[in-house]
Every structure is written in C-alpha cells, then in structure tokens.
Amino acid sequence: MTDTTPWTAPGVWRGLLLAARGVVGATARLRVTGDVPAPLRRGPLILAANHISPADPVVMMAACRTAGIAPRIMATGGVFRTPVLGAVMRASGQIRVDRRSATVARALDDATAALRQGSVVLIYPEGRIGLDPGMWPERGKTGAARLALATGAPVIPVAQWGGHELIPYDTARLGANARAVLRDLRRRPVVRVGFGPPVDLSGLTEATPGDAQRATDRIIDAITATLTPLRTDEPDRPRHRDPTRPADISRMHRRHA
C-alpha cells in the first residue's frame, strides 16, 4: 500500500518538533505514557487524538518528539494562510483542511496519498476543539475512519490532558487573561499524553454502509479509554475553569461497548 518513494520528514519539521519539546518543557511538565510499536513509528499510521485546547498541536508535537514519531498534521486552512507559518507548514509537508468549503474533500485525498507514502498522519476526529462540559471526546467526524478503511493503515488513539491550562479557548482574549495565563505558566501544570493500543477495526469495510460511522465510534471510544487514566482525579468535570470556553452538549458521545 506504500509508494516506492516513502516520505521523509524535512529538516525544518524535525527542528520544529525539537523546538516544541523545548517550549512545552519550559511551560509545563510533560508526561508521556504508552508506546507506539517500533514497526509503526515510520508509518503508514494514523494518530487519532482528542482536541481540548489551542495548545494541542504544540503539545502533540512535543509528545511525538518524545515518542520518536514525526507526524504530518491535518491542520485548518487558516494556519496555511498565515504568511510565515503557512510557508513553514507547506515546506514541512503538513496537510491542509479547508473546513466548510468546496475543497474540503481534497484533504482526505492528500492524507490518503500521505499514508500510501508511508507517512504518519495526525488527525483530530472531533473536527474542532471539543465543547463537552466534562471535556470528554465528542461524537466524531468520519474522516479518520474513512482514511483507515480506505488505506488499511492502523489507528493509534492518543489522549491528552492538561493543555487546556496553558492557553484559553478564546485566544483573542489572551491579553485580557494575561495575568491568569502567566500564573498558570509559573506553576508549570502537568500535561499528560497517552498513546493507546491500536483500534480494532476488524469486520468493517469501506464499502459497507454504516461502517465508517461504526469505525468512528470505535476510534472515539478508544480515545476515551486512553484518556480515562490520565484524569483519574478529574473524572467528571475539569478543575481548571476557563471562562472563555462555551459548553455544547449537542455532540456528546455515547460510549459504545
């Protein structure tokens, strides 16, 4: 399923992964648990992560650096439109997702091509920063599942907790919340990232109606199971209160057995 010319992470991307590890280490206490089997670390592999904070991409870059993985991140198109950062994202092989546009399907085509080159692709199946009041994973979009079923790439669930204490949900209010942010950074909150076992997608196929949603439910269930031991002392609601984060129960995920 891989091309004859496998993708290799450019030097600029390897440098950014190292820089992210330094930034997170300076502002938080990073704890990475679980493991990605060595044969999977170079891909093809899908990392499916929960999305809790604007800080998530940097946290995930630092955790992947610790785990010895150089993923290609499916990132919102707005990042690519930023003059300097957009150029870096393109040069480092990241995958653009133009949500709510006529070209959004192109992202799945690009991710499929990346996986067939033997890449590791990082995707947030929820499709947004989750707004569940308890900050548990929301009902997922089917993109990650369709990628897995179309390519046969294994899916590793990744759960993260603590990044929501680094940056408020509404980044436009960073200035107004500067004092609280500085207070949080001075105490260097613990940020936990856990890699779970591969998701069992056996018995599901790309061609069977409903299997993409069934696969999505399994992926979200696996992320939830990986997240549970990371927040044993906050099982219902997070202790950290972010006044800029709204609550939305319309996409609450009902865990499947």
Image (tube, helix red, strand yellow):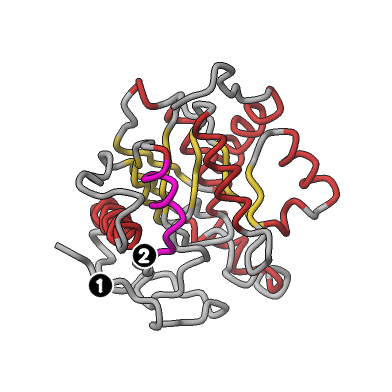
Instruction: Identify the mark nearer the N-term, 2 or 1.
Output: 2
Considering the image in quadrants, where does the C terminus appear?
bottom left
- Seen in the picture, residue 193 relative to 184 is either above or below; the reply is above
- Seen in the picture, residue 135 relative to 246 is either above or below; the reply is above
State the predominant SS element of the stretch in magenta: helix
Q: Which residue is mark 1?
A: 254
Look at label 2 and name its amino acid.
Pro
Local secondary structure at mark 2 = loop
Does residue 126 appear to the left or right of 159 in the view shown?
right
Q: Considering depth in this image, is 109 or 251 the residue closer to the camera?
A: 109
Look at label 1 and name its amino acid.
Arg
Residue 224 visible to the viewer: no
Q: Considering depth in this image, is 1 or 78 the residue closer to the camera?
A: 1
| Residue at x 66% of width, y 30% of height | 13
| Residue at x 56% of width, y 49% of height | 57
Does residue 7 appear to the left or right of 196 in the view shown?
right
> Callout 1: 10 Å neighbours few (<14), some, many (20+)?
few
> Callout 2: 10 Å neighbours few (<14), some, many (20+)?
many
Q: Which residue is mark 2?
A: 137
Q: Position of residue 217 (x, y in %)?
A: 29, 61
Q: Position of residue 209 (x, y in %)?
A: 31, 61
Residue 82 visible to the viewer: yes
Magenta stretch bounds: 140-150
| Residue at x 42% of width, y 60% of height | 142
- Seen in the picture, residue 110 relative to 138 is either above or below; the reply is above
Q: Position of residue 245 (x, y in %)?
A: 53, 77
Q: Quadrant of residue 11?
A: top right
